[in-house]
Image: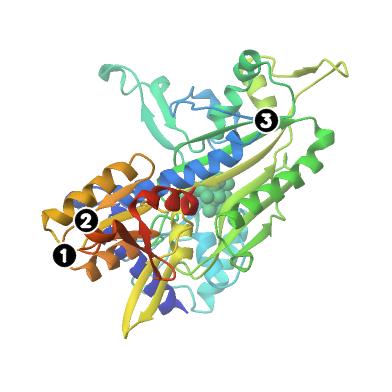
């Protein structure tokens, strides 16, 4: 099992680098742990996933509006939210090789569920494993591991002129989640758009956490993007709306090609004091060897607005003109990691097939998510073929992300397009000069169809839009 998982992680990490999806950040300087850069295809894939989320969460809804709030926020934001002092993970260090692990993740490996458990409970479990001789460093095998201690996830920065650098009041945090900005802009959103409850505010943006990470590729990183939606409502309709959003989000995954059996709901039993319900969507990662969280759906009560109202002194209550009731809205949130979805969709789409005794690697993305939709491949570099091929390319690129490639053998070019998940390859051959038609190859079936050039645009639109 572990070998299979390591093997898949290795394969996908190396494909991602080789084909320009994801690179380790600052590699020429030796890299930065748990920080990654997105290459051309990774950026396209990530943008397509983001757009698919936005379309579903904002564009096609009457009750959700958008926001793009700043990463730097007033330091009091994170005091009010409980992050300063309270946003921690339990850390265990190997005294020999200095590797760092999350205590709850070590316990998970032994089938002990200790997510958000108090330190004493974690250490009691670790002590027991230590006594039984089972507690070993996953990196070097040493048994010399420290007890669990608390480690803050907040990433500090500073703002102001260089001479102000050391002043405590200039310490700001890089936001650990994007929803903080949504709470702070709730009032401006209502005042500017005159929107009525219930409604949601959605945003996509970067978040930063000083994570303790061990070999999880882009699943858990220190800089990442979240796509969050906070839905403001009267508490009486929380259950109804919670179920509606749970259902809506589940269907989104299925719509973009995920299989029911690859996904499951995880119900949180230990809830934050203000929360009434919390479920996660989990995906069964081949690369990580099991089900892991991709999205959280949480009923958060009125905690967020009450806290920001209390700390800012600004009244954030809502007056319902119909009922005459004044109350602090409750919040239902959906929160998903964009980078985690990139890994999920690559993991899900990765297929190895035997074709004529050779292994074909294909990323069978949903066509809407595929980084490149069509590749134009002239069979020869002779101008009589490259000229019409370029003309087709120039026309189609106005509509879709299209690539033109005249290098190497056609087999190698197909292989490359399969590995980046391009749904259609269009070859321009010498026959094209006579019949004014091209061959369109389908990524998944590898079937080829002859299509007239003047019908090509319509044909591809029918398949891709
Ligand atoms: P975990 O238990 O995995 O640490 P969490 O419960 O702290 O996650 P939330 O704070 O609920 O996560 O964040 C919502 C979503 O943001 C997660 O479901 C995940 O998809 C994403 N996310 C959180 N932390 C990271 C990270 N370090 N790297 C990438 N994505 C992340």
Q: Is residue 368 left or right of residue 282?
A: left
CA neighbours of label 3 inside 10 A, class few (<14), some (14 to 19), many (20+): few
Image x and y of residue 427, in percent? 28, 61
Classify mark 1: helix, strand or loop: loop
Q: Would residue 335 be seen by someone viewing this image from the given angle?
A: yes
C-alpha separation, residue under disc 2 versus residue under disc 1:
9 Å
Viewer-proximal residue among 304 and 359:
359
Classify mark 2: helix, strand or loop: loop
* Numbered label attached to residue 408: 1
Q: Looking at the image, which residue is at 71% across and 50% down?
A: 247
- First reached walking from the N terminus: tag 1 or tag 3: 3
Question: Is the residue under label 3 in contact with that under label 2 (CB below 8 Å)?
Answer: no
Q: Looking at the image, which residue is at 58% across and 22% down?
A: 185
Classify mark 3: helix, strand or loop: loop
Residue lying furthest right: 323
Q: Looking at the image, which residue is at 74% across and 19% down?
A: 317
Viewer-proximal residue among 180 and 195:
195
Question: Is the residue under label 1 in contact with that under label 2 (CB below 8 Å)?
Answer: yes
Image x and y of residue 19, in percent? 27, 59
Residue 125, quarter of the rendered image: bottom right
* Numbered label attached to residue 62: 3
Image x and y of residue 245, in percent? 70, 44
* Numbered label attached to residue 110: none
Viewer-proximal residue among 182 and 393:
393
C-alpha separation, residue under disc 1 versus residue under disc 3:
50 Å
Image x and y of residue 419, in percent? 33, 64
Residue that carries the numbered disc 2 in the rendered image: 405
């Amino acid at each position: 099992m572990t070998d299979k998982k390591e093997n898949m992680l290795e394969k996908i990490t190396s494909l991602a680098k080789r084909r320009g999806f994801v690179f380790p950040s600052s590699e020429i300087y030796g890299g930065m742990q748990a920080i990654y850069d997105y290459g051309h295809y990774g950026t396209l894939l990530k943008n397509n996933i983001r757009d698919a989320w936005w379309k579903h969460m904002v564009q096609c809804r009457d009750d959700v509006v958008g926001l793009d709030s700043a990463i730097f926020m007033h330091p009091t934001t994170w005091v009010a939210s409980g992050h300063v002092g309270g946003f921690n993970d339990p850390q265990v260090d190997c005294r020999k090789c200095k590797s760092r692990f999350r205590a709850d993740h070590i316990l998970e490996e032994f089938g002990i569920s200790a997510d958000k458990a108090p330190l004493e409970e974690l250490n009691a479990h670790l002590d027991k494993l230590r006594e039984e001789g089972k507690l070993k460093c996953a990196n070097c095998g040493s048994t010399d591991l420290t007890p669990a201690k608390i480690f803050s996830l907040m990433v500090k920065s500073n703002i102001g002129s260089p001479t102000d650098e050391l002043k405590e009041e200039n310490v700001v945090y890089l936001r650990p989640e994007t929803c903080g900005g949504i709470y702070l802009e709730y009032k401006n959103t209502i005042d500017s758009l005159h929107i009525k409850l219930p409604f949601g505010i959605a945003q996509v943006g970067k978040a930063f956490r000083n994570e303790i990470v061990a070999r999880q590729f882009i699943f858990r990183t220190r800089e990442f993007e979240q796509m969050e939606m906070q839905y403001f409502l009267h508490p009486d309709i929380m259950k109804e709306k919670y179920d509606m959003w749970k259902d809506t989000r589940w269907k989104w995954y299925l719509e973009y090609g995920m299989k029911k059996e690859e996904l499951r709901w995880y119900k949180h039993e230990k809830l934050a004091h203000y929360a009434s319900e919390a479920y996660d969507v989990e995906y069964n990662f081949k690369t990580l060897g099991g089900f892991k969280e991709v999205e959280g759906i949480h009923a958060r009560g009125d905690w967020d607005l009450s806290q920001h109202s209390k700390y800012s002194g600004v009244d954030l209550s809502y007056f319902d003109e119909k009922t005459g009731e004044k109350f602090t809205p409750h919040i239902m949130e959906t929160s998903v990691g964009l980078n985690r979805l990139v890994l999920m969709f690559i993991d899900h789409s990765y297929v190895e097939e035997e074709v004529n005794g050779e292994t074909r690697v294909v990323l069978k993305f949903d066509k809407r998510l595929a980084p490149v939709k069509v590749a134009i491949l002239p069979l020869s570099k002779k101008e009589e073929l490259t000229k019409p091929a370029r003309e087709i390319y120039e026309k189609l690129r106005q509509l879709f992300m299209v690539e033109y490639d005249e290098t190497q053998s056609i087999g190698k070019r197909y292989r490359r397009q399969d590995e980046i998940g391009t749904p259609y390859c269009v070859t321009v051959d010498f026959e094209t000069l006579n019949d004014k038609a091209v061959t369109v190859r389908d990524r998944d079936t590898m079937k080829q169809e002859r299509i007239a050039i003047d019908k090509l645009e319509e044909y591809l639109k029918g398949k891709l839009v």
